[in-house]
Amino acid sequence: MAIEKVKVTGITFFDGTLDDGKHIDSGKVFIEHLLDFRKGTAKGSSTTAYPLASSKEAKALMNHDFPLVCEVEFLTLSSNKGPKTVINAIRPVPAASAPAR
């Protein structure tokens, strides 16, 4: 488990029932990461979508403006398909303690 302050550029979520009756409650958080600038062949940033276990955290962020600095608890889980990084918890960081970017 790792906790980091990151720049969140957006969120999506779905909490509802599909046509087949299956209930889905999930979300994604889009986090900005630097491109690999070390060789001089890239510059800037991109975003990566990380899954949330439920839409609860995403719904709590809907009343904030984006981009938004958040403290995120990442979990790296292993399965027969290999490691997968998910967000276990997320919360906005007050503006005064957010890192300048």
Image: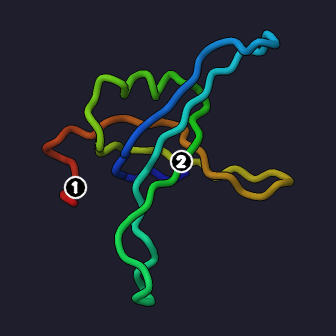
Side of 2 where 98 appears, left or right = left
Q: Which residue is mark 1?
A: 99
Report, in whole angstroms, how far the alpha carbon at label 1 lies from the one at label 2: 21 Å
Crowding at label 1, few (<14), some or many (≥20) Cα neighbours within 10 Å? few
Q: In the depicted view, which residue is nearer to us: 71 or 67?
A: 67
Residue furthest front in the image: 19
Picture residue at 37% right of the left edge, 45% below the top = 8
Mark number, residue 10:
none
> Residue furthest toward the bottom?
39
Residue underneath mark 2: 49
How busy is the neighbourhood of tag 2: few (under 14 within 10 Å), some, or many (20 plus)? some
Q: Residue at x 35, y 70 (%)?
A: 44
Kind of residue sitting beneath label 2: Ala
The x, y position of residue 16, in whole percent, is 63, 13
**Which quadrant holds residue 101?**
bottom left
| SS class, disc 1 | loop
Give the percent coordinates (x, y) of residue 46.
Answer: 43, 61
In this rendering, the count of numbered labels is 2
Quadrant position of residue 38 = bottom left
Residue 27 pos. (x, y %) = 56, 31
Kind of residue sitting beneath label 1: Pro
- What residue sits 49% from the left and 32% below the top? 12
Circles 1 and 2 in contact, beta carbons < 8 Å: no
Looking at the image, residue 85 sits to the left or right of residue 60; the answer is right
Residue at 59% of width from left, 48% of height from top?
75
Circle 1 or circle 2, nearest the eye: 2
Left or right of 20, for residue 93 = left
